[in-house]
Amino acid sequence: EAAHRSEVVVLCLLDHAAARDAVMSEAAGAALGGKTLVQLSTTSVEEVDDLAQWAAASDGAFLKGDILVYPDDIRAGRGAILYGGPEQLFSRLSPLLDGLGGQPCFISERPADTIRTANALYSFLYSALLSFLLGAAICRRNGIPVEVFTRNVIEPFVMDGSLMSYINSAGRAAGAQRYDQDLQATIDAWLSGLGTIKADIDALGIDTAMLEPFKALLGQTAKAGYGEQDIAAVIETLLGDKR
């Protein structure tokens, strides 16, 4: 009934199975014919492709969205919602998408690219949050207030632009595949520093297992011939460059 009465149907359920049960039926398909389905549920690349093909077969338009933040952030107007599908459709629906909260961000004409982009972000988020908690553990073990570490060290580093400066520099190098320009610190220098840091943390009796993959990745990249180049060269190891 909702599909019959609406030109646009927004779907935000637990997973693909719930979305499939809600709309991928003969009756819903008939109701959605010639209309637009905006899918905000969490799905895999294969699942969103499946739903997009079903929508096309039902003569409907399809837009995939990925919500990157908590509901409170959306209600406050913070955080992006990524969208993939026909750009013209995204532009036409902008007033509606703005009304959903957050910051609508067009990614690609391919719906599944929203998932790929979200996965890239979450890869960063997991590392950032867990690394922060390792830092908090170091502070607690040494009697340094975690609140002081958070407010006076981490927050300025993130908010004042230092972190984004590092990220932008690494992003430019990775995009250009050039790791010898505007060189601030080599991989060998990063690797040496990490060894010293890890030894100090180990001496505190704090588990440093999460640093081992970082150390191994830097070491593998250095052995591949990038030791005197920028840390951004790690992307070549991640992509499987055997050099």
Image (spheres, rainbow, N blue to C red):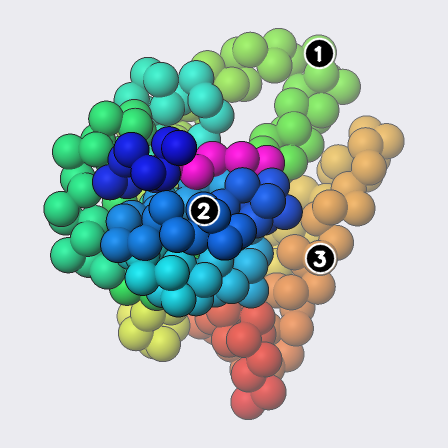
Which region of the structure is painted magenta?
Answer: 10-14
Q: Nearer the viewer, residue 161 or 12?
A: 12
Residue 99: horizontal and vertical position, in percent?
Answer: 23, 26
- Quarter location, residue 100: top left
Q: Earlier in the sequence, mark 1 or mark 2?
A: 2
Residue bearing mark 3: 213
Identified at 76% across, 19% down, the residue is 141
**Magenta run includes residue 205:** no
Give the answer, above or below, for where 72 lies relative to 126. above
Q: Earlier in the sequence, mark 3 or mark 1?
A: 1
Characterize the local packing of mark 1: few (<14), some (14-19) or many (20 or more) Cα atoms within 10 angstroms: few
Q: Amino acid at mark 1?
A: Gly
| Residue kind at label 2, given as amino acid type | Ala
Label at residue 60: none
Label 3 and label 2: CA atoms lie apart by 48 Å
Q: Which residue is mark 2?
A: 28
Residue 139 at x, y = what percent? Answer: 67, 20
Pair 1/2: label in front: 2
Give the residue at mark 1.
143
Dominant secondary-structure state across the stretch colored magenta: loop
In the image, what residue occupies the spot 17% across and 39% down? 94
Local secondary structure at mark 2:
helix
